[in-house]
C-alpha cells in the first residue's frame, strides 16, 4: 500500500452511505434518516446527530438507512476527535508529512497549546483507532438492500476546538490529504453514495486502523522525543527551543527525518502487529465486495466510484474495464503476500521474505535495516517471489497514475 492511499484515508469516508430496508419487495428509502444525516454533517452537530440516529436504530435495528447514517457520522466524529486533540497540543504540521500522514489533518494555530508527551500522542492514536472501530462495526451490521445518501462534501464541517467556536470545513481536509487546491475542485462536490461506497468506507476504516495499530504496537518514544518538535513546536520536547536554526530550514528537516528513521523501535504490544495484518486482509476483502457491488450497478447517479458504464463526477479520471480487472488482480496478489503464499523480494537477497511472519513474529522495527537488509533476515524463505513483471502488468492499466487510482479505488 502506498502513502498516498493513507493520505486519502482521513477525508475519504465522510462521503457515505444510507441503505434501503431489506425485504422481498422494493423498500422505500428512509428520507428522514438521509436528511438527518446530511443536516448533521452540514451543521457540524455530530454528537447530537449520532445520538438521534442511534435512537432510531435502537427502535428499528433493521433500518439500514439509520445504521449507515450513524456510521457516517461516527467516521466524521473520529476525524473531529483527533483534530481537537491536535489543536489542544498545538499541531503545526508541514503539508508533506508523508511518513506520518495522520498529522496532515489541517488544524488552526492554537496560540496557547498544552505540552504533549509520547503517552499523550499514543492516546490520541488509540482513541482514533477505537472511534474508527465504532464506525466500522456499525457498517458491518448493514443488512441487504440498496444504499443511497445524497451529500455535498463542500457543505460538511466539524468542531475543531470542541466548544463550537471554530468549525473546520471538510473541504480543507480534502484539499490537504489530496494535495489539491480549492480552484482544482468543482463548486459542488455533490455525490449520491451507495452500497459499493459503504463497503469502500469500511475498507478505509480498516486501513486507517492498520496504520494506527502499527504505531501502537511499538515503543517509539525516542523518535517522538527527538523529532516531533517539528509537529508540536511548543511541546517542551528535548529539542524545543534548543536548535541553532529552528524551523523552515531544509537541512533541519533532513536531520529530523534521519533521526526519525534511524532509531530502533521495540515491539511493546505484539498482538497489535497481528491486528495490522487482519485489518489489511479486511481491506482486500472489502475492496473486492465493493467492486462487486459497483460493477452490478445499472443506474448513473452522481457516482463517487463509477463502473465503466457509468459517468463519474471527476471528469479527468475515468474507469475502464482493464483498470477494474487490473485492480482485482492486484487484490489477488496482495492476498497471497499477506498470507505468506508469495514472498516479497528484497534487493539484497535471492530469497524473498514472508510478510505474514513479519506480523505474526514481530521483531524491533528499524527502517534503515529493512532497507539495507538485516531486518529481513529472520523472515527469508525459499518459495515463489513476487516479480516486477507481475506488478508492471498491473500498473500498465493505470497509465502511470496508479497511486492516484489506488487512493480512490481502495
Image (cartoon, rainbow, N blue to C red):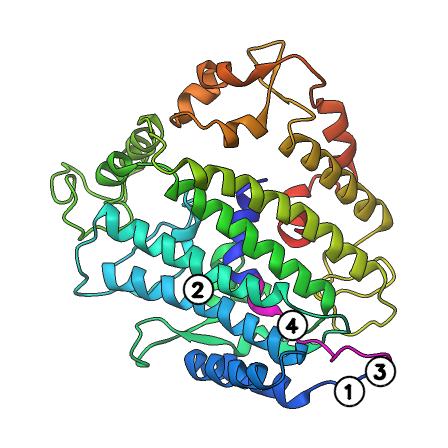
Residue that mark 3 sits on: 26
Residue that mark 1 sits on: 28
Question: Is 15 part of what is drawn in magenta?
Answer: yes
| Gap in angstroms between the C-alphas marked 3 and 4 | 18 Å
Q: Position of residue 262 (x, y in %)?
A: 33, 25
Q: Secondary structure at mark 1?
A: loop
Nearer to us: label 4 or label 1 = 1
N-term mark: 2 or 1 = 1
| Residue 24 position (above or below residue 266) | below
Q: Quadrant of the N terminus?
A: top right
| Residue 200 position (above or below residue 274) | below
Residue that mark 4 sits on: 17
Instruction: Give yes or no for contact between labels 1 and 3 (Cβ–Cβ under 8 Å).
Output: yes
Residue that mark 2 sits on: 79
Question: Is 130 part of what is drawn in magenta?
Answer: no
Instruction: Give yes or no for contact between labels 2 and 1 (Cβ–Cβ under 8 Å).
Output: no
Q: Quadrant of residue 35?
A: bottom right
| Gap in angstroms between the C-alphas marked 2 and 1 | 31 Å
Amino acid at each position: 500500500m502506498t502513502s498516498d492511499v493513507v493520505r486519502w484515508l482521513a477525508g475519504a469516508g465522510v462521503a457515505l452511505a444510507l441503505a434501503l430496508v431489506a425485504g422481498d419487495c422494493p423498500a422505500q428509502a428512509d428520507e428522514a434518516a438521509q436528511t438527518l444525516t446530511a443536516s448533521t454533517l452540514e451543521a457540524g452537530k455530530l454528537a447530537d446527530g449520532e445520538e438521534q440516529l442511534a435512537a432510531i436504530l435502537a427502535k428499528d435495528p433493521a433500518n439500514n438507512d439509520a445504521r449507515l447514517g450513524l456510521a457516517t457520522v461516527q467516521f466524521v466524529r473520529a476525524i473531529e476527535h483527533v483534530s481537537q486533540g491536535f489543536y489542544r497540543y498545538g499541531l503545526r504540521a508541514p503539508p508533506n508529512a508523508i511518513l506520518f500522514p495522520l498529522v496532515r489533518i489541517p488544524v488552526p494555530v492554537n496560540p496557547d497549546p498544552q505540552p504533549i508527551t509520547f503517552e499523550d500522542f499514543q492516546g490520541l492514536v488509540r482513541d482514533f483507532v477505537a472511534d474508527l472501530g465504532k464506525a466500522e462495526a456499525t457498517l458491518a451490521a448493514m443488512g441487504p438492500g440498496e444504499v443511497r445518501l445524497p451529500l455535498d462534501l463542500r457543505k460538511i464541517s466539524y468542531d475543531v476546538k470542541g466548544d463550537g467556536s471554530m468549525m473546520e470545513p471538510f473541504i480543507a481536509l480534502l484539499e490537504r490529504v489530496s494535495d489539491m487546491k480549492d480552484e482544482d475542485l468543482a463548486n459542488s462536490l455533490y455525490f449520491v453514495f451507495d452500497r459499493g461506497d459503504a463497503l469502500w468506507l469500511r475498507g478505509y476504516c480498516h486501513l486507517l486502523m492498520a496504520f494506527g495499530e502499527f504505531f501502537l504496537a511499538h515503543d517509539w518514544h525516542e523518535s517522538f522525543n527527538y523529532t516531533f518538535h517539528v509537529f508540536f513546536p511548543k511541546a517542551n520536547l528535548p529539542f524545543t527551543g534548543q536548535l541553532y536554526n529552528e524551523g523552515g530550514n531544509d537541512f533541519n528537516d533532513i536531520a529530523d527525518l534521519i533521526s526519525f528513521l534511524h532509531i530502533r523501535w521495540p515491539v511493546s504490544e505484539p498482538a497489535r502487529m497481528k491486528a495490522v495484518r487482519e485489518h489489511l486482509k479486511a481491506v482486500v476483502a472489502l475492496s473486492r465486495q465493493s467492486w462487486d457491488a459497483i460493477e452490478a450497478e445499472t443506474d448513473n447517479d452522481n457516482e463517487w466510484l463509477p463502473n465503466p458504464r457509468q459517468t463519474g463526477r471527476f471528469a479527468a479520471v475515468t474507469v475502464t474495464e482493464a483498470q477494474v480487472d487490473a485492480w482485482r488482480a492486484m487484490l489477488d496478489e496482495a492476498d497471497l503476500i499477506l498470507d505468506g503464499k508469495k514472498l516479497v523480494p528484497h534487493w539484497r537477497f535471492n530469497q524473498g521474505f514472508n510478510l505474514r511472519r513479519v506480523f505474526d513474529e514481530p521483531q524491533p522495527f528499524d527502517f534503515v535495516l529493512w532497507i539495507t537488509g538485516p531486518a529481513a533476515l529472520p523472515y527469508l524463505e525459499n518459495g515463489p517471489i513476487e516479480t516486477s513483471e507481475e506488478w508492471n502488468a498491473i500498473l500498465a492499466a493505470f497509465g502511470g497514475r496508479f497511486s492516484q487510482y489506488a487512493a480512490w479505488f481502495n
